[in-house]
Image (tube, rainbow, N blue to C red):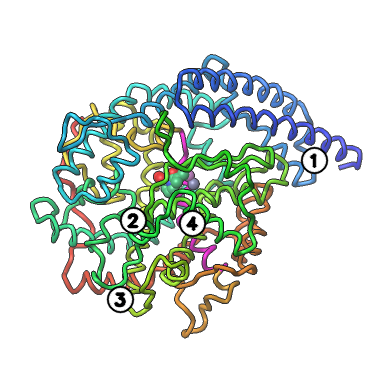
Amino acid sequence: DSEQDLQRAKQFLEQLNKEYGEWNNKYTLANWEYAANLTEENLAKKLNVSAEVARYFKSAWEKVNEYPWKDIKDSGIRRQFKKFSVLGRSALPEDRYQEYEKIISDMENIYSTAKICDYKNRSKCDLALEPELTEILMKSRDPEELKYIWVEWRKATGEKVKSLYPKYVELSNLAATLNNFSDNAAYWLKDYEADDFPEQIEALWQQLKPLYLQLHAYVRRELRKKYGENVVSKDGPIPAHLLGNMWAQTWTNIADFAIPYPGKQMPDVTHAMIKQGYNATTIFRVAEDFFTSINLTAMPDLFWQRSVLEKPKDRELICHASAWDFYDGKDFRIKQCTRVNMEDLLTAHHEMGHVEYYLQYRNQPNVFKEGANPGFHEAVGDVISLSASTPSHLKAIKLLDDDSTDTEANINHLFLKGLEKIVFLPFAYMMDKWRWNVFQGQVTSDNYNCNWWDLAEEFQGIEPPVDRSEDDFDPGAKYHIIADVEYMRYFVSFVVQFQFHKALCVEAKQYDPQNPNSKLLHECDIYNNTAAGNLLKNMLELGSSKPWQDAMERITGQKNMESAGLLEYFKPLTDWLTAENKKTDEYIGWKPRARQCVQ
Ligand SMILES: C=C(C[SeH])C(=O)N1CCC[C@H]1C(=O)O
Ligand SMILES: [Zn+2]
């Protein structure tokens, strides 16, 4: 590149980034107004702004395509142009784009405002997913009530969006082809910058599946003991409604009876949080305190002024937790219908991890204000939670009395973590296995639901509590499916977060893999350690300015996603479960389900 060429390119990008930031700010504000207050008026405003923004993006995109950027040698400059050369949904013709935005907004509205009637009192019909249904699934131990809630939620959501989904798929694929991708699956995969990414995920799953099978067998046994053999079989899939979560994606809410050593330490601090008068704000202040303790950045004042941290009583909104970057380097928010329980304490750390990433890369050019890949963005807060949820840390913040680290306490702690992290892997995988099938055309709308249940059985080893059919649309009962949010990011996050955790723990001298007397990896707590914080910061500040493999290398010293971190963290649990299942001669895995899905 001649010096003059470089200058010209830099000026071109300077202007483009400036405009890109301004339009993104406008678009995000309109999206926030609708998400935080689901009125027809706010939807109309959001659709108008998105049309205006799309017109700008399309004109900018034409200028980028005319610019001779492909032979620029400077890799950072070329990387910016490459990102700007992907137009996204705005590539759709204007009327198609409006239709697309409206379909997704309508599905989000149906999902977020869905109400069902109470099991015991059928005339009380104002139960929403958050908090009512989530809490019933957490607490109820009545299989009939759980079955009712499970079925009614799917009637009120999946069934209602079923007719919209094929058009969403068609327009998603059209937009992808207008961006020169074969389909929307390929469009989503571009963010992982690896031609063999699906193969990388499959290899990771094969390495992690044996541990999942052991945990699945043990939990099925505990459920059978609780509910009897007529409800939970010895060797079949687990009925999905008994696992404490609407989608069976984490099973932490049945730890109270499934925990290996009941009566021993059980690091679920919900009770203590309630007793100590925690509220949404104190929950987020506890999370913020951890980030600042390792030399990361406090939440700006605007965050506390503009975030919505509790469910408002006077309006409908999207309760599903989310973090927002308004692209002006100042305005960052979280919207979360926070309840006082451990799950929401961990979610608060998760969401604040997103804001921390926004804060660390806020000086990047706007086009690089993204995670190194989407999975990295999901991992930041969870890495902090791995330290924050250790018994020793929970004791330090006075939420736990017993922080003993004898074998039984360790197994209980690892078991609870396993119900959150190991259990989640097959769910995350099948979520986008199904959508890849759909976008690639292997699954069409006449067998959406039965393919979904084939995958749920194959990967999660669960089955529906009642027979399903193609009149149902169970994928539509999960937020990310109706909100057009890609999900493989969470599988990636649940693998790389343990690689990051291990690297930060070694940096903090909280863990030494070579020293048999060192703490175990799951006991590590990087609280107050600025060396660990600085190592994390070195990666976060990159944004997406470098390929994620370089970002990975900055923290772990190597470039690959590996299952080793997770397997090392859970090693004591793996050994314990394997021995326990052998002792009880538990059937590992599951035979085909009894419940049918009728075509
Ligand atoms: C908390 C968020 C917002 Se990015 C979320 O959607 N998560 C966090 C973990 C998995 C996934 C889910 O709830 O399905
Ligand atoms: Zn997230």
Residue 217 is drawn in which quadrant? bottom left
Give above or below for 41 relative to 114. Answer: above
Closer to us: mark 3 or mark 2? 3
Callout 2: helix, strand or loop?
A: loop
Task: From the image, tell me which residue sits under label 2.
Answer: 423
Q: Which residues are magenta?
A: 484-504
Q: Amino acid at mark 2?
A: Val
Task: From the image, tell me which residue sits under label 4.
Answer: 382
Q: Is residue 218 visible?
A: yes
Task: From the image, tell me which residue sits under label 1.
Answer: 72
Of mark 3 and mark 2, the one earlier in the sequence is 3
- Magenta stretch contains residue 496: yes
Q: Amino acid at mark 4?
A: Asp
Q: CA distance from mark 3 to mark 2?
A: 21 Å
Which sits in the foreground, 282 or 382?
282
What's the residue at 56%, 73% (across, down)? Answer: 506
Q: From the viewer's perspective, is 218 left or right of 495?
A: left
Tell me the crowding category of disc 3: few under 14, some 14 to 19, or many 20 or more residues within 10 angstroms, Cα based.
some
| Residue 160 spot, x, y in % from top left | 31, 25
The numbered mark at residue 408 is 3
Q: Amino acid at mark 3?
A: Glu
Callout 3: helix, strand or loop?
A: helix
Which sits in the foreground, 32 or 173?
32
Q: CA distance from mark 1 to mark 2?
A: 46 Å
Residue lying at the far top in this picture: please name it: 95
Tell me the crowding category of disc 2: few under 14, some 14 to 19, or many 20 or more residues within 10 angstroms, Cα based.
many
Considering the image in quadrants, where does the N terminus appear? top right
Of mark 2 and mark 4, the one earlier in the sequence is 4
